Image: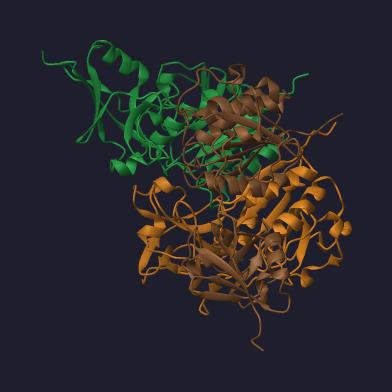
Chain colours: A green, B orange, C brown
């Protein structure tokens, strides 16, 4: 007897003041009351598709296979953009086709993609201002009851869907400098860069004898720490955080205040070797 | 075999910092662990009964029939106000009798109303500061297990319960102007008016040949748009939003900042006809 | 047939912007999808172990027996502090050993305590920055499936675990004054003191004929009210709140603004008797 309860996660920029998130859950439960609804976040900056892309990429693999991930960061609602459904590694995503799934499919892989156009699974009438309620939520609920993707609409490929231009870390022409940037700042003030551990290790692996120096504005941090408490309380450090990205933190304090840092600020990695 | 799980929604002004919302859920789950708990909002402005009334009216019909809606915006807690239970269209509401259900019953209809006075369904001892925990939550949990309304307390009618004075749109004596106001501003900065689509269409239907002009302070918007992207990014528009109320928005931006608007600001609708 | 669904509560300082809370829930549901997940709060001040201790103490008894309470306020993550599991009154707590359970065990009682060290129940690899995800969440999920505490790690006693220095109310040497302080300010601006009803009644019980006067800075409040509406709207009062602690409130307004009060401010209780 299968006892697993389908999980539907929700990621929006709706905030938690209005009834919008609750209404989406009501629509889902009206179709399937036997689901686990999980909020990933509703406090994304309004219309910030890139943050949504980062968050869903960082989160989805921690959920059970067969989870359905609803993403409604949708500045183009009511316009010409499609709604799409995408399957990958057993996870199902329903989202506007505005690039919000760019990082989930960054490896060029998806198991199945379709347009969401079959109105049989929509709430009626469909408004022009709230497709999260009228299209995405009911489709997610029907998916949790087991309908197959092809019933939703025409088959698509990765080439058919929109992607974001993501900032990627760059290697200087002399290969002495890896240049990334801050792509996100979390609730604790940790500065999350776009330098992933693999890229970092390939870069630093070439010069094992030297000292790694992380640069942020005019500040320099020597080496990458294994845990926050390797420096004194209130001191800065670099560390690979829970997303496997290089982060600049301050032990038990807020690095964004400490460095007056913002998203987009350049972060560099250099290997210093002794002169003689 | 019926597998539907009862839904209990929660709408409060408790905020999300303290343990208050969690405690209410704990009380409910201690009585019935097989429920779906859904937050509608806990970030209503403190003691703002009108906003709570707007939100629950805009939300409840999206939930399954038999849902139980818990509303705790209760500045009069511990005083003389009653707690009431009201049934309408298969939905059940438990709330303080302070007018918060005014808009749910705006059409003059309710299937069943009773006072909540039977202490058999209360937590003991009942505090004078937190009836949400001690009365409303346990009563909602018992309702989810199937107890009938008459067991809660004496029968009431709509005339027995308190209602709010709601601002309604007014027609000028020459019938040339429909005058409403902003009643709510959402997370996106959309300005939600009290002009519903039906009232609007009756008004404008009389003068189909003219141009509809929406006025807000010294600003004028021509016509009502079908979707946000009918104007350029950053430009204002009028649109019927997801609550079927006329809203003033700015495409992909914040209308409340754009217009420096507040709740209570007058919004007018006029039909301009050519002079000759 | 047992139909009770295990409850897992979550109390963190993660905020609701990032994916961290969602990820913790994903980890739990990947191990046991048949649980009720309840947020107690995620908006604790960052690293504020004392507030977390107050909140969990004030909340846990409202949840069903056998609930599992996950607490992740963990400034020392990745350092030398242990993770512990503690059982008391049928409730199970999983938390860093940083004193966050000090108030739960203030009465010197716990049924069972163990270190959490058995990696069989951890997510792999274990990061040094997010033990909430990698250790505490999966352990809580396994506990909800019925594993016994001794499987998690070595047995501990109350003497083995860390406790906070809690501010306690003090009696002046002449026994004329009870001196406490504000330990928390809630969303409504209520000022919550560390003077519990029992201590208060023992103190005032000695001088029943006099008048109780509560002092806060240069302000004085006469007597303790039974409910908010015993004073006019906008007037201050003292009342025993929902945590059974003495609170300073303002009827339908914000006492923290009214008194410009902060956590740590002294609150005194005196009995005034007539001169003749």
Seen as rendered, the residue at the extreme bottom is C276
Q: Which of A85 and A59 is in front in this view?
A: A59
Q: Look at the image and tell me whether residue B204 can be seen.
A: no
The quarter of the rendered structure image containing the N terminus of chain C is: top right
- Answer with left or right where residue C135 lies relative to residue B93: left
The location of residue B218, given as percent across then percent down, is 35, 69
Seen as rendered, the residue at the extreme front is C173
At x 68%, y 66%, the residue is: C203
At x 49%, y 29%, the residue is: C130
Seen as rendered, the residue at the extreme left is A276
The location of residue A108, given as percent across then percent down, is 41, 16
The location of residue C133, given as percent across then percent down, is 54, 28
The quarter of the rendered structure image containing the C terminus of chain C is: bottom right
At x 48%, y 17%, the residue is: A110
Q: Look at the image and tell me whether residue C246 can be seen.
A: yes
- Answer with left or right where residue C104 lies relative to residue B15: right
At x 66%, y 47%, the residue is: C59
Q: Which of B192 and A228 is in front in this view?
A: A228
Residue C141 higher or lower than C268, as above or below? above
Seen as rendered, the residue at the extreme right is B151
Identify the image quadrant of residue C213: bottom right
Q: Give the mark count.
A: 0
Q: Which of A197 and B153 is in front in this view?
A: A197
Residue B271 higher or lower than C42, as above or below? below
Residue B102 higher or lower than B30, as above or below? below
Identify the image quadrant of residue C170: bottom right
Identify the image quadrant of residue C111: top right
- Answer with left or right where residue C212 lies relative to residue A239: right
Q: Nearer the viewer, residue C148 or B202?
A: C148
The location of residue C22, given as percent across then percent down, is 55, 34
């Amino acid at each position: 007897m299968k006892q697993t309860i389908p999980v539907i996660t929700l990621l929006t920029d709706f905030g938690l003041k209005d009834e919008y998130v609750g209404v989406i859950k009501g629509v889902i439960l009206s179709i399937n009351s036997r689901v686990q609804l999980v909020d990933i976040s509703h406090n994304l900056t309004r219309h910030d598709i890139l943050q949504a892309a980062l968050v869903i990429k960082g989160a989805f693999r921690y959920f059970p296979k067969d989870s359905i991930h609803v993403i409604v960061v949708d500045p183009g609602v009511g316009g010409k953009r499609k709604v799409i459904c995408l399957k990958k590694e057993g996870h199902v995503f329903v989202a506007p086709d505005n690039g919000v799934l760019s990082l989930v499919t960054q490896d060029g892989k998806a198991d199945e993609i379709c347009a969401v156009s079959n109105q049989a699974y929509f709430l009626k009438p469909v408004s022009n201002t709230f497709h999260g309620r009228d299209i995405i939520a009911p489709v997610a609920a029907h998916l949790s009851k087991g309908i197959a993707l092809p019933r939703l609409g025409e088959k698509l490929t990765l080439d058919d869907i929109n992607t974001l231009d993501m900032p990627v870390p760059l290697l200087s022409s002399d290969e002495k400098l890896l240049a990334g940037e801050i792509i996100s700042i979390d609730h604790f003030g940790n500065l999350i860069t776009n330098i992933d551990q693999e890229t970092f290790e390939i870069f630093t692996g070439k010069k094992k004898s030297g000292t790694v120096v992380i640069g942020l504005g005019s500040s320099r941090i020597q080496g990458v720490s294994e845990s926050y408490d390797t420096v004194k309380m209130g001191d800065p450090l670099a560390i690979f955080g829970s997303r496997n990205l290089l982060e600049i933190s301050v032990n038990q304090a807020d690095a964004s205040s400490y460095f007056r840092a913002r998203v987009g600020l350049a972060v560099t990695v250099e290997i210093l070797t002794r002169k003689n």
